[in-house]
Image (tube, rainbow, N blue to C red):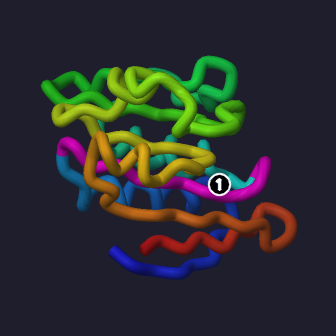
Amino acid sequence: MRCRQETDDPRETEALGARLARALAPGDVVLVAGELGAGKTTFVRGACRALGVSVPVTSPTFTIGQRYPTGGPLAVSHLDLFRVADLAAEEPDLLGDYLRADTIAFVEWPDGEAEIAAFARIAARVRIEHAGGNRRIVEIE
């Protein structure tokens, strides 16, 4: 799925995340970039809901990552690497619990793409930018 779309509110940003989620398979990773407050977690929340996550989806900024159950064999991982200065310098196991063959993962602040790609297939890259007020420009490639 490739697109560039302007959203007018958080619900529309979540809906784009849900649309992308329907095209993903276990083992896929989605890299989600954008400045602070751009709507990265909002996008991921929409994707998680479409994948069957029913618990609250919040930014894992202070925990590196979270794994969410979906009610089935698939799990969803949500990582936030904002506080990781150099992913290449970290222990490889830092990502191992989150990027697995039975998991679809969303990675916010995805610096260190090579290290991420060593664990799983990068299925999509998302870039979200402020466009004034609640509007966002969302690019998916």
Q: Is residue 111 left or right of residue 28?
A: right
Residue at image x 51%, y 63%?
Answer: 126
Residue lying at the far front in this picture: please name it: 89
> Residue 133 in the image: x percent, y percent?
85, 65
Check residue 29 for magenta coloring.
yes
Residue lying at the far left in this picture: please name it: 73
Residue at image x 31%, y 60%?
Answer: 123
Asked where in the image residue 94 lies, by quadrant, the reply is top left
Q: Is residue 102 left or right of residue 125?
A: left
Looking at the rendered structure, the kind of residue marked 1 is Pro
> Residue 81 in the image: x percent, y percent?
61, 36
Check residue 62 for magenta coloring.
no
Residue extent of the magenta highlight: 26-37
Q: Is residue 42 visible?
A: no
Q: Is residue 51 left or right of residue 124?
A: left
- Under circle 1, the secondary element is helix
In the image, 6 versus 127, the foreground residue is 127
Residue at image x 47%, y 23%?
Answer: 91
Residue picked out by circle 1: 10
> Residue 3 in the image: x percent, y percent?
45, 80
Neighbor class of circle 1 (other Cα within 10 Å; few <14, some 14-19, many 20+) is some
- Rendered view: 36 above or below 93: below
- The C terminus lies in which quarter of the figure? bottom left
